[in-house]
Amino acid sequence: MTGGPSLPLASDALVLFGVTGDLAYKKIFPALQAMAKRGTLGFPVVGVARSGWVRDQLVERARASVTEYGGLDPSAFAILESQLRYVEGDYHDPDTFRRIRVELQHAQRPTFYLAIPPSVFPAIVQRLADCGCSKGARVVVEKPFGRSLESARALNQLLLRTFPEESIFRIDHYLGKEAVQNILYFRFANAFLDPIWNRRYVENVQMTMAEDFGVVGRGKLYEETGVIRDVIQNHLLQVVSYLAMEAPSSTYAEAIHDEQAKVLRTIRPLTTENLVSGQYRGYRDEPDVAPDSQVPTYAAIRLYVDSWRWEGVPFIVRAGKRLKMTCTEVRVEFKTPPPVVFHEPAPPEGNYVRFRLSPQVAIALGARVKSPGEAMVGEPIELKLVDGPEQGTGGQMDAYERLLGDAMAGDATLFARQDVVEAAWAIVDPLIRTPQPVHAYEPGSWGPGDADRFVSGIGGWNAPE
Ligand code: NDP
């Protein structure tokens, strides 16, 4: 983005650790093919794994990936294929890194993408430092950034021993979503919002991230994660920071990150009375899930931002699996006007701004207008300002293509900075340290009824449609 110092030099090679894995298959190969199609894949891609493959197997894996996720584009794939290299080896063996160096040829500023389980990060980062590969390089790490505040700090210290902060790109793909960036744009590009975006006019803010599917065979991973670590600490608190932050001085990365960190630090650490955890019936029968698992597949939390702007306004965030539908939506609901002019029943909902983040993209304003007829009574209407298909369709960049391109270019705006990550962990850390009993809920519902207490005085949940 703009408004700060010019960008550093672009990376001249990409090294993909964990190239045989799920993330590479679902997200990274399709993003690389899209870059090839757009003419921006002008660098070698070195895949690294322990699997004992040969390069041809890697090419076939890449082909299967793009075919399944987005479709094979023969000429773009030919470019990707011509750039693909493969190094096989153990991450504890210095020889693996010598061979990576050979494959990198003359590259001076490689980007190392750690698409591997976090337990392997220390070995790789240390070997990169030992072999001199980290000089001038960038590193991309995937969420989750740690499992708690303490482990996030330890991970940051580990990375910072080898890479300066400006060379560390922590991917939270939510920040690469067009719809999430539009929250920031919409808030600060529209004068009419500014006077009302505060505790005097906003009644509550609700966010729902619902999935109608369960853990789809990844029970082992989910047992170690749970919904708070999986999506709330990262994606949803990043969105809360965009909704609640003060205006940044520009779109320069540091300016935005400064405001995100400031607002997250003003959110009270969560207490158990502001959490309801749930688990869908049937979760314990999933493969690799403990028969007495207490891991939450649903959580509703009530946050308070202790700032001049937001004092007293509840931010209610819920996320879960096997819910009624798949969608992510934010609703900022305004206070209702005093009921002194019109003699009609109090409307069930006030004015609102609605941001649909997925699967479709929408921004809408909710208002009331008079119903035709003699009586002075009204009805709700919604004015849609944005109403579009999901990102990644119709030639739009998918979030991973955007983020990969930005990391290669050295633009950190849409990545998570160390202090922002740690401030988000500080909010949920008390809940993670003292896990709560989970309330069972029916698949296909909106989660456990116990969570209704967060919205009982404010007109109930704003259920997405
Ligand atoms: P996988 O479990 O698929 O592992 C990726 C690769 O890492 C494997 O193919 C394997 O390759 C290698 N690997 C696994 N265990 C070890 C080990 N102990 N030592 C060395 N190498 C190992 O992970 P994902 O691809 O799902 O995820 C990669 C990273 O991205 C993780 O940090 C994850 O949290 C994160 N992430 C993943 C998402 C997804 O959709 N999958 C979404 C968001 C984040 P080989 O044995 O061939 O070397």
Image: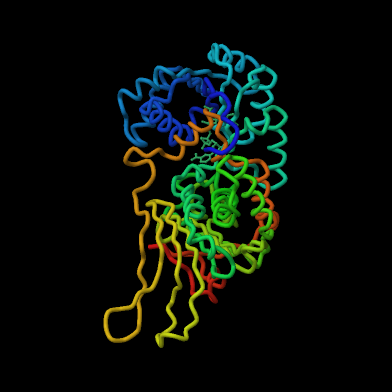
Q: Position of residue 90 (x, y in %)?
A: 60, 21
Image position of 153 with respect to 458: above or below? above
Q: Nearer the viewer, residue 243 or 221?
A: 243
Image quarter of residue 37? top left
How many marks the image carries: the answer is 0
Image quarter of residue 254? top right
Q: Residue furthest bottom?
A: 343
Q: Position of residue 76 (x, y in %)?
A: 34, 25
* Residue 331 visible, this angle: yes
Q: Position of residue 441 (x, y in %)?
A: 49, 64
Image position of 339 with respect to 328: above or below? below
Q: Position of residue 436 (x, y in %)?
A: 64, 61
**Which residue is drawn at the image coordinates 58% and 20% (left, top)?**
109
**Which residue is drawn at the image coordinates 49% and 67% (left, top)?**
333
Image quarter of residue 305? bottom right
Residue 293 located left or right of residue 21:
right
The colour scheme used to paint the residues is rainbow
Q: Quadrant of ligand 1?
A: top right
Q: Nearer the viewer, residue 259 or 189?
A: 189
**Which residue is drawn at the image coordinates 60% and 54% (left, top)?**
246
Residue 393 located left or right of residue 451:
left
Q: Quadrant of the C terminus?
A: bottom left
Q: Residue furthest front?
A: 191
Q: Nearer the viewer, residue 310 or 163?
A: 310
Image position of 197 with respect to 102: above or below? below
**Which residue is drawn at the image coordinates 65% and 55% (left, top)?**
428
* Residue 232 visible, this angle: no
Q: Residue furthest left?
A: 373
